[in-house]
Amino acid sequence: MDVYKQFLSLSSFTALNHFSRILLTLFLARLLSAEQFGTFGALLALCEILLLPASMGFSASLMRLSHPLYKAQQHDLLQGLKRVYLVASCLFGILLVSCVVAAFSYVSPHQTAKEHIFYLLLLVPVGAIMQSQAAFLIALNKTKVGLFTQQCLFEVLTTLFCFIVFIIGGGLSLTVICQLLFSALVCVVIYQYWLIKKTIEPSPARYQTKQWCSSSLIMLASGAGTVLVAKLDVLLVHHWFGAAGVSVFFPVIVIAGLLTIIGNAASQFLKPLLMANTAPYQQVSELMRLLWKLNCGAIITLAVIAYPLLTLYGEKQLEAGHQLLLILLLGQLFLPARILASSIIKLNGNPLHNLYVLLAATSITLIMAWCLKDSYEIIGVATAFSFGFILGALCRVAIIVKTMQVPVTVLLGTHKLSSIR
């Protein structure tokens, strides 16, 4: 029962992250034109793709780097690590985004997106700091506030700022929304920094910069591709079918993303468990048993209430949106397997194995999307990405079962014995 209570407690905070996204997107979908909302969706997806590489991988590696330091009360090294990831996010983020902005402006055929792409120079570096500091707070045993400031607080503030401006000015433009996004990010980053400063004892900073950066770059190579694939479908729809296509596809992505409430909570629960010297398979198995049940129940629920959810967005192409949602939900049936396998590889194995799987699955996904887009349009793209998700999950499962000797019973949630490693 302890496993269930801890998991459900974390789920409430990961739920806040996604419901804040729904709140923001519902508000903007009702106020913006289809073209503006589609452009907003594409820019937001591109921004989220760039956050991990902009942090130089620290937003993914900080749990692995800082949690042992915090347990050992090495506050001098924690002070040094804090400064290193802040500098890395500022310098590397601005350099990366400058290159992406230049490339996007040259490649994209859509003028509205080109006019607003430069806001990423502000949004991405500050967003990377926000993500890194959220991960740092989680590693410092501030799990709930870390999860809350990872996404939810920023999106709630943005919605609030948009509402105030709309009431005062009587309207919203995409330019103003980008400016309000930046303002909300700055507020969250300042709040996180204050929390971290309170948690770490004042002491002279000590550095292990080379070791930290090399570890983060490995996590970057492992994790950046995962983020890219998670958002690549939105960017491809925007490139091939324009902002109007994204206005149909983006609400479906947000609704299907409700399943990440379960996935993110499971990932956070697994991190300290898998990093411990001994982690009973029985606990992991209990979590997986719960995860399979919740995931299947959530998929069935979303499939049943798909039409009302799409109607909330003012979606006019309900039939197309419903088909897209069902296709994406089909792939998410394998979400629990992917979460466990990916976490074990990242924390107990070689993180680069995740990258190898990702490269192979993504290549097949892109080929499928290219072949299907002309005949089936957005439906074909969704089918390709759903298949790619399933393929990646099965490949990761094969790695942990064959090379790391993780029992299949743990994956299925039927393990009864107590041992690990």
Image (spheres, rainbow, N blue to C red):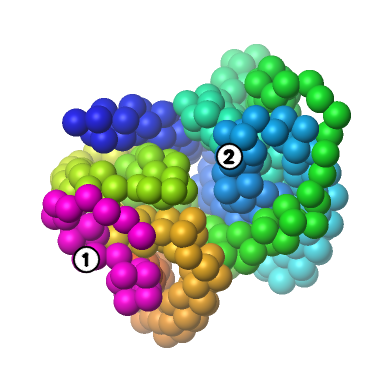
Answer yes or no: is residue 393 visible: yes
The residue depicted at 42 percent of the width and 56 percent of the height is 343
The residue depicted at 61 percent of the width and 59 percent of the height is 219
Q: Please give the residue where the numbered disc 2 appears in the rendered image.
A: 67
Relative depth, front residue between 251 and 352: 352
Query: Real-space Cα distance between discs 1 and 2?
Result: 29 Å
Badge 2 marks a residue whose secondary structure is helix
Range of magenta residues: 398-421
Amino acid carrying label 2: it is His
Relative depth, front residue between 121 and 57: 57
The residue depicted at 71 percent of the width and 71 percent of the height is 107
The residue depicted at 35 percent of the width and 47 percent of the height is 279
Residue 402 magenta-drawn?
A: yes
Answer yes or no: is residue 112 visible: no
Return the x and y of residue 229 as percentages of the image width and height.
50, 65
Relative depth, front residue between 88 and 174: 88
Q: Please give the residue where the numbered disc 1 appears in the rendered image.
A: 408
Amino acid carrying label 1: it is Val
Badge 1 marks a residue whose secondary structure is helix
Question: Is 252 rendered above or below residue 398?
Answer: above
Return the x and y of residue 286 as percentages of the image width and height.
21, 45
- What is the crowding at mark 2: few (fewer than 14 residues within 10 Å), some, or many (at least 20)? many
Return the x and y of residue 99 as percentages of the image width and height.
80, 63
Q: Quadrant of residue 186?
A: top right
Relative depth, front residue between 75 and 24: 75
Q: Quadrant of residue 182?
A: top right
Residue 304 magenta-drawn?
A: no
Question: Is 208 rendered above or below residue 314?
Answer: below
Question: Is 352 rendered above or below residue 212?
Answer: below
Return the x and y of residue 393 as percentages of the image width and height.
34, 67
Residue 230 shown left or right of residue 158 in the figure:
left
